[in-house]
Amino acid sequence: MALTSMRAPASPVLGKALDLRFSVGPYRYAIEKNGSIVHYRMHSAGEPLQAALVWAFGTGRVAQSYLFSAPDGSFREARVTYFSSLDNLEFTPARGFTTAASPEQAMYRDVKPAEVKLCFGCHTTASFHDDRLDEQQLFLGVTCEACHGPGARHASILQSAALAGVSFTGPSAIFNPTSLNPQDAIDFCGACHGTSWDVFLSGVHGVTNVRSEPYRLALSKCWGKGDTRLLCWRCHNPHEQLRSDPESYDHVCLSCHAGAPHTAGAGPQARPPCPVAKSACTSCHMPKVYVPDMHFSFADHNIRVVRPGEAYRE
């Protein structure tokens, strides 16, 4: 999460010797780096349009999208995004078109202030002061304070305890998300990763909403009215790199779905064991769903028994 935003010239994706190009109808797109400037170009029948990319959002593991500045200082979103599965450019998700009213519309989309706040709010830390974006003082990526709040007093308390040679066991003067109840916890992560309310307001239907993991998790039968054993951080340590191999999560699944009476997790709240397998649980119960406009498959967090040939559940 610490790498979810960067200045475009510092992007490792754009620093590689890539020939980033995409064409649709009469429009030809290209992104090229020249020294410390990343040029975004769009050619059509008339004069080519060009801009210097300023911001890159996304690590590039799946995709990376770009913003550049308009003459009045507002932001514009490039109409194309880099996708790792293509190792090239394609339409930015949900920004494709069949016809454009002008070359400018084909090249970019104006980003409204409310959306700018959402973009920087989820991809950077402490980016707004007095409700104004501070591009110079913000912290790149999701740092500690993005989830835990201001940490100066917390650090001071612990440093004082260390200097005094004592172990500090009192209030740490910092917010700990693990103290939240299940519904608040899922909304906390969903603030950036997508809640049911976000899905409702966006009007998105079909496989695209598989990317809203908290929303999908809350649809799980075992979630019920909120199960503290089924919170986001039970599977994903936010302080570590995301793990993509199914076996990494088996210990979490088996802590509830005990395979035998002596298995960890066995007890009054233990769930029935899986009759099929005891490893790679997520490969069956959280199948990957291909999202066309992302050119990537995402694990469906609606945990369930998936029947062969079953259609995607809204």
Image: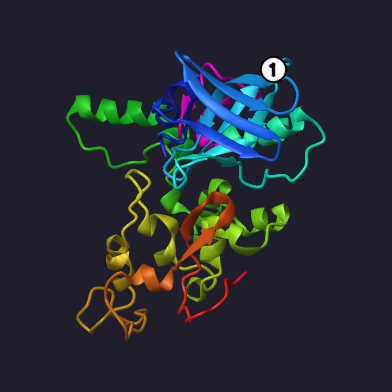
Picture residue at 58% right of the left edge, 37% below the top: 22
The answer to whether residue 171 is seen in the rendering is: yes
| Residue 54 x, y percent position in the rendering | 56, 22
| Residue 60 x, y percent position in the rendering | 44, 39
Quadrant where the C terminus is found in the figure = bottom right
Picture residue at 36% right of the left edge, 58% below the top: 235
Magenta stretch in the rendered image? 121-141
Given residues 310 and 259, the one toward you in this image is 310
Please, is residue 167 above or below residue 297 in the view? above
Please, is residue 206 above or below residue 17 in the view? below
Quadrant where the N terminus is found in the figure = top left
The secondary element bearing badge 1 is classed as loop
Given residues 78 and 29, the one toward you in this image is 29
Q: What residue type is labelled 1?
A: Gly
Q: Is residue 167 left or right of residue 304?
A: left
- Furthest toward the left, the residue is 165
- Furthest toward the right, the residue is 101
| Residue 40 x, y percent position in the rendering | 59, 24
Q: Which residue is the site of mark 1?
A: 73
The answer to whether residue 212 is seen in the rendering is: no
Given residues 53 and 124, the one toward you in this image is 53
Q: In this view, does 140 lie to the left or right of 266?
A: right
Please, is residue 153 above or below residue 87 in the view? above
Membership of 276 in magenta stretch:
no
Q: What is the crowding at mark 1: few (fewer than 14 residues within 10 Å), some, or many (at least 20)?
A: few
Picture residue at 65% right of the left edge, 27% below the top: 42
